[in-house]
Image (tube, rainbow, N blue to C red):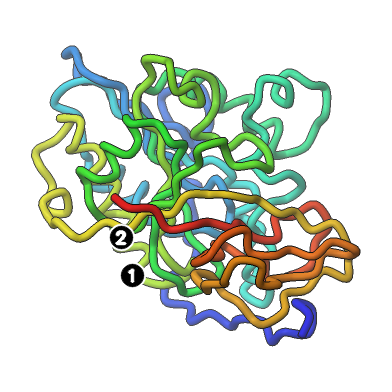
Amino acid sequence: MSAAQTQPYIPKFEVLPRDLSAYKTGNTGIDYVHRFESGKPGPHVLVNALTHGNEICGMVAATHILDAGLRPKIGTLTVSFANVAAYESFDIEHPFKSRQLVHNLNRVWSAAELDDATDSPELRRARELRPVVAAADHILDIHSTSQPVVPFWVYPAHARNAALATAIGRPPVHLVMPRGLGSGTPLIQHGAHGDAQSTAGAAVVVECGQHFAQSAADLATDVALAFIAHFGLTDPHPAAAAAQPQRRFELLETHVIKSMDFHFIKPVIGFEVFAKGELIAVNGTENIVAPCDDCTVFMPSQDVVLGKEACYLTRPVSS
C-alpha cells in the first residue's frame, strides 16, 4: 500500500488557531517576539512556538506565558512566535498544509543558508529571528506531530541537552541525534548550540503529541513552565518533579523522499519496530531497510512530497 493510497489521518480538532494580532507588537523591534529582563544576573531563556505553522500547541504555551504576565526573577525570558505567516494560512479542510509556506523553517538555520541570497517567507523570518536565537543561552522549541503518537524530546547528543530533558522528565521519551538531523539544520542547532564543545546552554525540541489535541497543548504549557523554572527564572514547577522511567532512541538514518513512487511497505504512524534487514519502504529504486534489530521508525511522512523527510530510523539505547 502506498502512502498516497493510505487513508489520511483525520484529526479530532480539540484545539484550533486563535487570532494572534494582539501579540504582534512586542518590545524587541521584531514582530511576535517578547523579552522580559529581570535586571538581575541569570541565564537568557527562549521559549519558541510555531516553527511550523500548524503545530499550535506551542501557540497555546506561549500565549499562556504572556497572558499570565509571567516575569523572570533572574535573567531574561524571551517568548517568540516563529512562523505566524504559515499559521495564519490554516484551513480546517486542509489542516496539515499550514506547516510552512515555502521552506521548512526548521531546516534553514545554517550560516550558509541564512547568508545566502535565496528568498522565501521562512528564510526572511529566520533572518529576522537569527539574533533572537543567537542571544539565548537555553532554547525550548515547541513542536507537535501529525499522528497521535507518544510525545518525545529531540536534541543533539550533547550532555547539556540530555541533562535538561532528564531533569524535567516529561515527556519520558528521547530522540537523540549524535550526528545532527541529517536533512538540514534545525533551529536548536544554530550557531554555538550545534557545537558539542561550546559553552552554549541546552537547546531542545519537545514534540508534544498530535497537533490539535488538547493533551498536546497541556503538555506544551507544562513543559514550557518547567523549562523556565529549571533555570531558576521562576519558582519550581510541579511537572519538573514527576519522575518517570526514561526511554532513549538514537537516530541512525534520515531518509528523504526521492521519488513520487515512494511508499511504506505497511501503514505506519511512528514507533513501529522492524528487525534488521526488514524492508520498511521503497523510495524509487532504493529500498529502505532496517539497519539493526529493534529499529524504530520516528515521524514517517504521511504524504509523498519530493525532498521531504520520509522517516527517521532509530534504535533504542540504554539509559
Residue under pointer 2? 219
Residue 98 vs 41, above or below: the answer is below
| Image-based side of 157 in relation to 280, left or right | left
Q: In which quarter of the view is residue 135 placed?
A: top left
Q: Which residue is mark 1?
A: 215
The amino acid type found where label 2 is placed reads Leu
Query: Contact, CB < 8 Å: mark 2 with mark 1?
Result: yes
Query: Above or below — where is 315 with respect to 31?
Result: below
Q: Which mark is residue 233?
A: none
Three-letter amino acid code at the position of disc 1: Ser
C-alpha distance separating marks 2 and 1: 6 Å
Q: Is residue 171 visible?
A: no
Rendered-image quadrant of the N terminus: bottom right
**Of helix, strand and loop, which one carries label 1?**
helix
Q: Residues within 10 Å of mark 2 (few under 14, many from 20)?
A: many
Residue at image point 10% right, 42% down: 236
What residue is rendered at 84% in x and 61% in y? 286
Image point (45%, 71%), residue name: 149
How far across and how far down the image is residue 33, in percent?
45, 32
Residue 78 is left or right of residue 53, and the answer is left
